[in-house]
Image: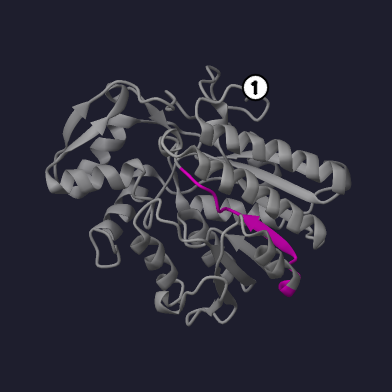
Amino acid sequence: MKILVTGTAGFIGFYVAKALLEAGHEIVGLDNINNYYDVNLKYGRLSESGINPSDIVYNTYCQSSKYPNYRFIRLNLEDKENLFNVFEQHHFDKVCHLAAQPGVRYSLENPYAYIDSNIVGFLHILEGCRQYKIKHLVFASSSSVYGNNNRTPFSEKDRVDEPVSLYAATKRSNELMAYTYANLYGFQITGLRFFTVYGPWGRPDMAPMLFADAILRGEPIKVFNKGDLYRDFTYVTDIAEGVCKVLFKETPQKDLYALYNIGCSQPVYLMDFIHTLEEHLGKKAKMEFLTMQAGDVYQTYADTTLLKRDFNYKPSISLQIGIKEFVKWYISEKNPIK
């Protein structure tokens, strides 16, 4: 199949594209390579996929030297004309939309970036899928839509109308927009609410990278809510496998829109996560205990019953193995920003 995957210079998009390529599918990867975090990490992921960073020019295709069935284009989601040209040229069977402006805390500082990418950009993806007759769109939502939900584990049936960050509000908006398009225009759309994803090539604004960097430098790590937090940490290859399963599921006509949690469903106490990281880094952390940060939530905990029922989804990578693999990559020469 021919598939558009957006966000392939990003963390999850990089792994999903790799899984699809190794399964023999033809992939066009798209990313704007913005500077929300160190672009060397984004270029490093692309290099790992056979895309030469020196060949990357805006709105120009690059051929992978590693995968004959992979081409990459640098493009903004807000650039409707050129985005629609990509749809028109390739006649995609399916679209996996993983590109977005991420980060709960950054949304407090730069709200316009979230509207441009996550609202306007997502509308362009929906319109591209509608106009060019895409069979199935899978898009990334987030566990942040649950806000300060007191019920655990978080279920797709829970109320999600009280987001605590603009990032969360844009992701909930995406879900509503997708529901409308699926029902108005009759094509299949599936949203995935990602919980905390970690692993090699992860984002430097996320806890594993922030903590590993500080521990190895002998600097204090910031531990919010004095460490009394729980996160549903899920290893990235488990996530990528789940995304691929969902992408190829054909649903009955009456169920054009679907929404699933995707996580490990085993929340980890933040202090336990830190101690596991210390163990594999071989160094104790200095800790600066702080109060709860604005926009954060106390606990994320995925109820993945529906995903298990419909796709036989079952994460297989334990925290011990996942942290071991992350640290192995982090201290290696493959990490372009260590």
Secondary element at tag 1: loop
- Specify the amino acid type for callout 1: Arg
Against 261, residue 1 (above or below) is below
Residue pointed to by mark 1? 159
Name the residue nearer the viewer: 113 or 160: 113
- For the N terminus, the quadrant is bottom right
In the image, is residue 93 part of the stretch drawn in magenta?
A: yes
In the image, is residue 55 part of the stretch drawn in magenta?
A: no
* Picture residue at 45% right of the left edge, 79% below the top: 55
Q: What stretch is highlighted in magenta?
A: 89-102
Q: Quadrant of residue 245?
A: bottom right
Name the residue nearer the viewer: 191 or 121: 121
Please state the horizontal and vertical placement of residue 216, each as a whole percent of the image: 16, 48
- Asked if residue 312 can be seen in this view, the reply is no
Q: In which quarter of the image is residue 156?
A: top right
Q: How many marks?
A: 1
Relative placement, left or right, of 103 versus 272 is: right
Against 64, residue 178 (above or below) is above
Name the residue furthest top. 150
Against 84, residue 268 (above or below) is above
- Asked if residue 288 can be seen in this view, the reply is yes
* Picture residue at 27% right of the left edge, 58% below the top: 328
* Picture residue at 64% right of the left edge, 47% below the top: 120
Please state the horizontal and vertical placement of residue 329, each as a whole percent of the image: 30, 60
What crowding class fits label 1: few (fewer than 14 Cα within 10 Å), some (14-19), or many (20 or more)?
few
